[in-house]
């Protein structure tokens, strides 16, 4: 049970900004400050991380599907045209770029989480 009080002096603007962030996270200002001091993630931060993971997974699935469709076409026709080879290489480059971008973002998330 919480029985101790703590006073904090800040400007009206700071309080408004903090309250807006707390509201966005559907928390009281007190709970928001405690979460930040103790290093917990707010709801909006958790949502952003989950949103990133969902988007990157969906994007990966689309590119992987395109690569599989090209591979199926090649296996069915037992040949590959220059156009199909170029299309395949473009998809592989897109996939490689997505993986690099995701790895950079994941490193940022891990760094952020390690500070908590």
Image (cartoon, rainbow, N blue to C red):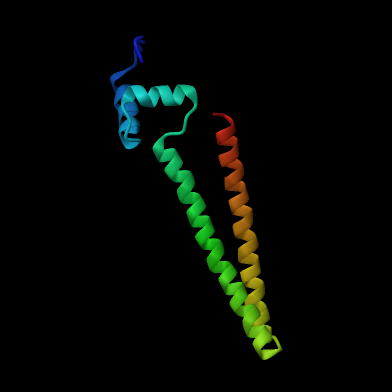
Residue 26 located left or right of residue 115: left
Residue positioned most to the bottom: 77
Give the total number of marks visible in the rendering: 0
Residue positioned most to the right: 79
The C terminus lies in which quarter of the figure? top right
Rendered image quadrant of residue 73: bottom right
Location of residue 3 with respect to 78 vertically, above or below? above
Location of residue 74 with respect to 66 vertically, above or below? below
Residue positioned most to the front: 1
- Viewer-closest of 42 and 100: 42
Rendered image quadrant of residue 42: top left
- Which percent across, then down, holds residue 87? 62, 77
Q: Is residue 115 visible?
A: yes
- Viewer-closest of 38 and 10: 38
- Which percent across, then down, holds residue 78? 71, 89
- Viewer-closest of 37 and 85: 37
Q: Residue at x 48, y 54 (%)?
A: 54
Location of residue 93 with respect to 49 vertically, above or below? below
- Which percent across, then down, holds residue 77? 66, 90
Q: Residue at x 60, y 36 (%)?
A: 111
Location of residue 48 with respect to 88 vertically, above or below? above
Q: Is residue 83 visible?
A: no
The N terminus lies in which quarter of the figure? top left
Q: Residue at x 59, y 52 (%)?
A: 102
Q: Residue at x 30, y 33 (%)?
A: 23
């Amino acid at each position: 049970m919480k029985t101790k009080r703590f006073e904090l002096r800040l400007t009206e603007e700071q309080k408004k900004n903090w309250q807006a962030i707390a509201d966005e996270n559907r928390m009281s200002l007190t709970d928001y400050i405690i979460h930040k001091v103790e290093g917990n993630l707010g709801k909006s931060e958790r949502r952003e991380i989950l949103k990133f993971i969902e988007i990157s997974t969906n994007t990966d699935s689309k590119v992987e599907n395109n690569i599989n469709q090209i591979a199926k076409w090649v296996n069915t026709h037992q040949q590959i045209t220059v156009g199909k080879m170029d299309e395949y290489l473009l998809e592989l480059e897109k996939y490689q770029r997505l993986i690099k971008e995701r790895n950079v973002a994941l490193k940022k998330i891990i760094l952020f989480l390690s500070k908590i």
